[in-house]
Image (cartoon, coloured by chain):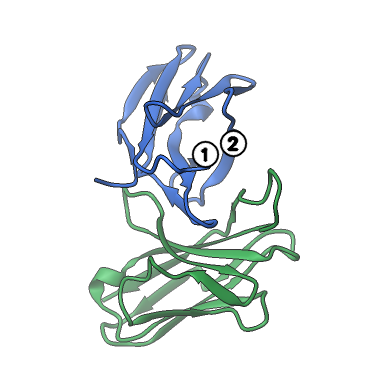
Chain colours: A green, B blue
Amino acid sequence: GAGVSQTPSNKVTEKGKYVELRCDPISGHTALYWYRQSLGQGPEFLIYFQGTGAADDSGLPNDRFFAVRPEGSVSTLKIQRTERGDSAVYLCASSPGTSGGGANVLTFGAGSRLTVL
Amino acid sequence: RKEVEQDPGPFNVPEGATVAFNCTYSNSASQSFFWYRQDCRKEPKLLMSVYSSGNEDGRFTAQLNRASQYISLLIRDSKLSDSATYLCAVKTAGNKLTFGGGTRVLVKP
């Protein structure tokens, strides 16, 4: 697609429920990132994929968070047993991911706003 | 200490004035540096990459000081439309990009 697409744009759920957030990156981008942003804060790194594999998942806060990218394109961020503290905007970004000046230039999606009641 | 730190501001800037602010990073092995702009309730968008020799894009000038481990952004002739949060981003190990907390700039008539 022309840009990074994220669905849903808004998700309201109850504490303890399971949530999936989807990201469709720019066509041909091999690198895909997930970030979480709370109000007044900068984006907090969660996980980065290069192709199908998670190259760096050091930002996932605990084992309730998991992300997959089975075919190297669309990615899903999964959150189990949601807690109120998980409420944030979840941003997905993609980049060409190859060497060269543009390799690390991220293009972000509009985000998925998650509210846990 | 956070990996990437920014003064949260806000920087209140008269229209037409110049404003500059810094971003410090803790990892001396950091390789690439960027400034992103984020409007309220929108996603971050790349403003400019920061090169070792410094670079300019219109009214925006970015500088890198490796010795003191900071990057800077200067905005000349500020416009009302420059009001936004400016995020610095630093590439460390692998391709992980770490963002600062952002500096809020408010340009007023």
**Residue topped by disc 1:** B33
The location of residue A24, given as percent across then percent down, is 64, 71
Q: Secondary structure at mark 2?
A: strand
Q: Secondary structure at mark 1?
A: strand
Classify residue B1 as left or right of residue A105: left
Residue B18 sits in quarter: top left
First in sequence: mark 1 vs mark 2: 1
Q: Amino acid at mark 2?
A: Ser
Q: Residue at x 30, y 76 (%)?
A: A62
**Residue B42 versus residue B99: which sits nearer the camera?**
B99
**Looking at the rendered structure, which numbered label has been put on residue B20?**
none
The location of residue A96, given as percent across then percent down, is 69, 57
Q: Is residue B46 above or below residue B19?
A: below
The location of residue A75, given as percent across then percent down, is 58, 76
Q: Which of the image's four quarters has the C terminus of chain B?
A: top left
Q: Is residue A26 above or below residue B64?
A: below
Task: Estimate how packed mark 2 is, as few (under 14), some (14 to 19) or many (20 or more) residues with alpha carbons within 10 Å.
Answer: many
Q: Is residue B38 above or below residue B52?
A: below
Task: Estimate how packed mark 1 is, as few (under 14), some (14 to 19) or many (20 or more) residues with alpha carbons within 10 Å.
Answer: many
The location of residue A22, given as percent across then percent down, is 55, 76
**Residue topped by disc 2:** B49
Q: Residue at x 42, y 20 (%)?
A: B20
**Residue A18 versus residue B90: which sits nearer the camera?**
B90
Residue B29 sits in quarter: top left
Whether residue B41 is visible to the viewer of this picture, yes or no, is: no
Q: Amino acid at mark 1?
A: Phe
